[in-house]
Image (cartoon, rainbow, N blue to C red):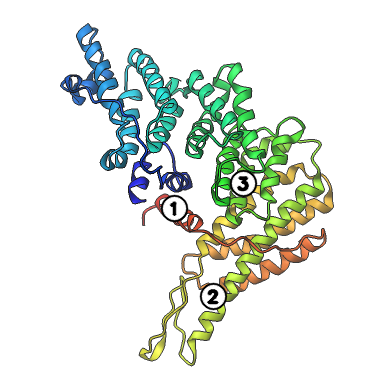
Amino acid sequence: MERVRRLLSGGCIQGMTLLLASVLLAAPAVHAQYETKPIDEAAKRYGGSRAKRYARNPTGVEADRTGFGNYIRGVYLASMTQFDAESLADLGKLRYDYMRNYLWAAAPSVQQDLTRLTFTEMSQVIRDNYHPAVKYNAMLLIGELDATYATQTTGSVPMPEANKLLTDYVNGGVDTARAPAPLIVGALVGLERHAKSLEALPAANRGPTAAALLKVLEKDSFPQDLSPSVSQWIKVIAARGLANIGVLGDGNRVHNAMFKMIGDEKARLNTRVRVAELLDMYKNAYGSATGLNEQETVQTLLQLATDIASDEEERAIKYEDEMLGGMGGMRMGSGRGGGFGFGGGGEIELPDEYQRRRLVLRLTGLKKGVEAVKPAIKDQRFAGLLDEVLTAIEPVLNRATEENLILLNLVTDVKQMSSTIATASASLGVEAVDAPPESEEEAAELLQEEEAAEAAEPAN
């Protein structure tokens, strides 16, 4: 498994998508005979350093042009088709280095030829019998191809042919079990990126791109034999792509699909929060939205708020009981930041620290979603209930982000928040439901979020 995680590392995909792909690719078919493209030993003599120089500053000498093309096709791209353990471990790095050292850095004339060569070679890999991880890497690489690459002053324009391949694969993939789930994921990662530059694509690509993403989000189930957590994360990728477009759709169809997922009580709570947080990217759309079912919209947000508050209250009470119960007659020290000191030189085993970072992530996502949608809610009663939620969570967020936090004080605030939200939600008949148990994927996902948040914090 660690080897698969390594091969999927790199600059093109982030966070839970890495973990999802590693789960899907962790058990390749036994005794399968996969194809490879042979390494051209003659082309290898051209050399990587020379190829990088040519990409940046093409000489116009035909021998150089031929040697460069042979090296890319017969050495670099061919190396991405090998499936020995070492080659698979290096796939993610190879892909990122290829984009950085060749496509992104190349002179415009080289970029155009190199992009078409890459598209042709990787399209064949996807079609033919290559190793699943090799095919997944090829799909990710296709998703990175642009007709015009970004510069310091201009944005990228996705390659229309690549966009069509990804769109067609997603459309067909979610309807037939024959399409491998990792390739659907890889195609969605590319479409998510393309959605950021949707208006730069030709008109013939725009509608199908949005429609493919919406098709995934609206899908009740996938024909592949996927775990619930994997199915949910595939939808999250599609939801992120749609959020990059930022429109609610004809008849508010995108809004309805997003809220169906936010209100899915069988989905993991963190997944529902993620989708709610994406509503922040629809702020402009909600500012002028019409025709929403306001009661259903508010009930769904209240359901999410109630489920978060109830789950966090349960965790907080458990922490409080373990903490205070384990103290016995010992004197508690400062108790700041989750670390507690005890007088008299005694030693006891402390409970696991209450995870305030999870609490902050959840409440921040909920807050963004509620604030984005609230301008579209014209009924004063419904708008008032959303205000009650925002008012209830604000003190908890403030407390949880204190530098020298005493966790037992946060526990008290969480219990008060839960009571306030429960009362507000009950006025519309909303009660908390038990969240599905956390999976190994969610635990790893939370860890990745924590690491990303720590990396974003300014140095002391």
Which residue is painted at 63% across and 69% down in the image? 313
The correct choice, above or below, for 99 with respect to 106 in the image is below
The correct choice, above or below, for 443 with respect to 73 in the image is below
Q: Earlier in the sequence, mark 3 or mark 2?
A: 3
Q: Name the disc covering residue 257, or none.
A: none
Residue 241 percent across, percent down from the top left: 57, 35
Q: Which residue is mark 2?
A: 319
Q: Which residue is mark 3?
A: 275
Q: Quadrant of residue 394?
A: bottom right
Q: Marks 3/2: CA distance?
A: 28 Å
Q: Earlier in the sequence, mark 1 or mark 3?
A: 3
Q: Look at the numbered disc 3 and give the secondary structure of its residue.
A: helix
Q: Residues within 10 Å of mark 3 (few under 14, many from 20)?
A: many
Which residue is painted at 62% across and 65% down in the image? 311
Please, which residue is most extreme toward the front here? Answer: 31
389 on left or right of 6: right
Q: Residues within 10 Å of mark 2 (few under 14, many from 20)?
A: many
Which residue is painted at 56% across and 66% down in the image? 399
Residue 447 percent across, percent down from the top left: 44, 57
Q: Quadrant of residue 48?
A: top left
Residue 56 percent across, percent down from the top left: 27, 19
184 on left or right of 65: right
Residue 171 percent across, percent down from the top left: 59, 29
Q: Which residue is mark 1?
A: 448
What amino acid type should be assigned to the residue bearing mark 2? Tyr
Query: Quick one: quadrant of the C terminus?
Result: bottom left
Please, which residue is most extreme toward the left here? Answer: 45
Q: Look at the numbered disc 2 and give the secondary structure of its residue.
A: helix
What amino acid type should be assigned to the residue bearing mark 1? Gln
Q: Marks 1/3: CA distance?
A: 18 Å
Q: Earlier in the sequence, mark 1 or mark 2?
A: 2
Q: Please state which of residues 35 and 205 is positioned toward the viewer in this rendering.
A: 35
